[in-house]
Amino acid sequence: MSDLKRKGGDNHNASRKKKYRSDGTPMWGKRHIDGPGIWVSCVKGKEKQTVGEMYDLFESVASDIWPVGGAEEKEKTGDSDDEEELSIEDQIKKEMSEMKRPRAEQRFANCQTDTPCVVFISCKPPVDPVELVVKYIESVAKTGATRSRYTHRLVPVSGTCSANLNEMKSLCEKVFGAFFEKEKGKTFKYKVELRIRNHTVLARPAIIQHIASWVPEGHTVSLDNPDIFILVEVFKSVCGVSIVHDYYKYAKFNVLELSNKVNAQKIASEPDSIKMGPSPVQGPAQQE
């Protein structure tokens, strides 16, 4: 009996052993929300519809930045302008062979949050969630069109981890290292923009203090006039981090607020005659 207990205990201890990533950092637990991605705040009760419209929107924007196929794909599939010269039999064979080709891998995936108004869409390489969101936000700022019905705010994160200080430090070092490596020789004033939802383990002041301590030397905190913003999203047991520019300029990436602001400015800049519409046509009795 004792041997059985000992074996059972050994198996239990083995299952609880800490796992490590390829870089040597420990993995502290499993997460349903994983990888680089985008947090989406939406209308309550419209989470499913939001996921659908985000798939379409993100795929459209991503296709402009990271085209799938292109000229090489066309050559590969044998598409050409003289396709009409093929016989009906050859066209059928060609269509059948194209149908058998494996479908392109989906670049976006919905991760269950089990929370009203909150959606997380993970991104697969080569998609960079920060570049994707910024390009979309810039188009909203230019046109005033959101191309969505239920979305409020988008927050891109370059990576996610379990919401504990050990893993958060590893993630921040990775994200900060990648960003500042591209901006070598520059110094920045930064501000930590932290949002905590459904999480009670780590206190807000402690998180901000630790995040600031992990920023490489030479960069300074500025609450009033930052050059860059360190976005930190803590949701339940998950933490996501990214670095962006112009966060306040673009209404904290609230597409609904930004769109309303842009459209209001357009209306304000129009001549009074356009705002009031055409004057009523005078009838015969009104004419002098």
Image (cartoon, grey):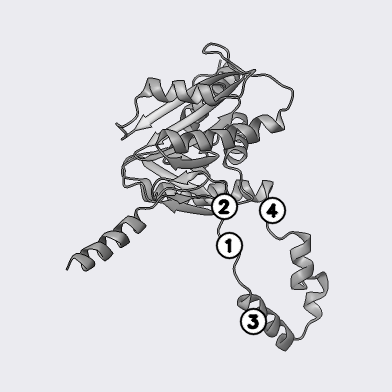
Q: Which residue is mark 4?
A: 67
Sequence-wise first label, 1 or 4: 4
Q: Which residue is mark 2?
A: 124
Q: Looking at this view, is 105 or 10 the one in front?
A: 10
* Distance Cα–Cα, label 3 vs label 1: 20 Å
Residue at image point 60% right, 31% down: 176
Q: Nearer the viewer, mark 1 or mark 4?
A: 1
Q: Nearer the viewer, mark 4 or mark 3?
A: 4
Can you give x and y, in whole percent of width and height, for residue 174 in the image?
58, 37
Residue 85 in which image quadrant: bottom right
Sequence-wise first label, 2 or 1: 1
| Tags 2 and 4 touching, CB below 8 Å | no
Kind of residue indicated by mark 3: Met
Q: Which residue is mark 1?
A: 105
Can you give x and y, in whole percent of width and height, for residue 205 in the image?
39, 20
* Distance Cα–Cα, label 2 vs label 1: 9 Å
Kind of residue indicated by mark 1: Glu
* Distance Cα–Cα, label 2 vs label 3: 29 Å
* Distance Cα–Cα, label 1 vs label 4: 13 Å
**Residue farthest to the bottom, as pictured:** 89
Sequence-wise first label, 3 or 1: 3
